[in-house]
Image: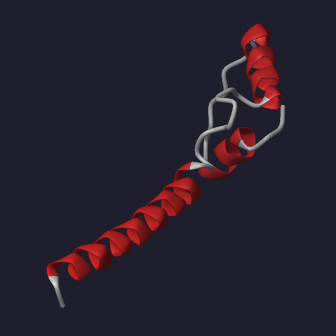
Amino acid sequence: MTTATLVRKLNREIGILQKDIREIKRVVFAPVVDPEGEYHPSFVKKMLLREKSKGPFYRFTDKESFLKHVRSRT
């Protein structure tokens, strides 16, 4: 092969790899960041209610009760 042919082949392969990397980044990093860059309204509402309540602090005795409290919707 001539040098020009090799350069064209390498450029084509690099272009394919760049497209693959863009697709991988889009799939891997997109779920982590909200498209608007804001918190979900339900999360904000939940955190504001907890801050206002200034209710009792919880003392957890086992991992089940901790997970139950963390996963609760209130």
Residue 28, how many percent across, how many down? 53, 57
In the figure, 44 relative to 73: above or below?
A: above
Residue pictured at 35% horizontal, 75% vertical: 13
Quarter of image, res 55: top right
In the figure, 67 relative to 3: above or below?
A: above
In the figure, 26 relative to 16: above or below?
A: above
Give the quarter of the figure containing the N terminus.
bottom left
Residue at the limit of the structure toward the bottom, as seen here = 1
Residue pictured at 76% horizontal, 31% vertical: 40
- Residue 57 left/right relative to 49: left
Residue pictured at 53% horizontal, 62% vertical: 23
46 and 60: which is toward the camera: 46
58 and 10: which is toward the camera: 10
Give the quarter of the figure containing the C terminus.
top right
Quarter of image, res 54: top right
Residue 31, how many percent across, how many down? 63, 50
- Residue 19 left/right relative to 55: left
27 and 13: which is toward the camera: 13
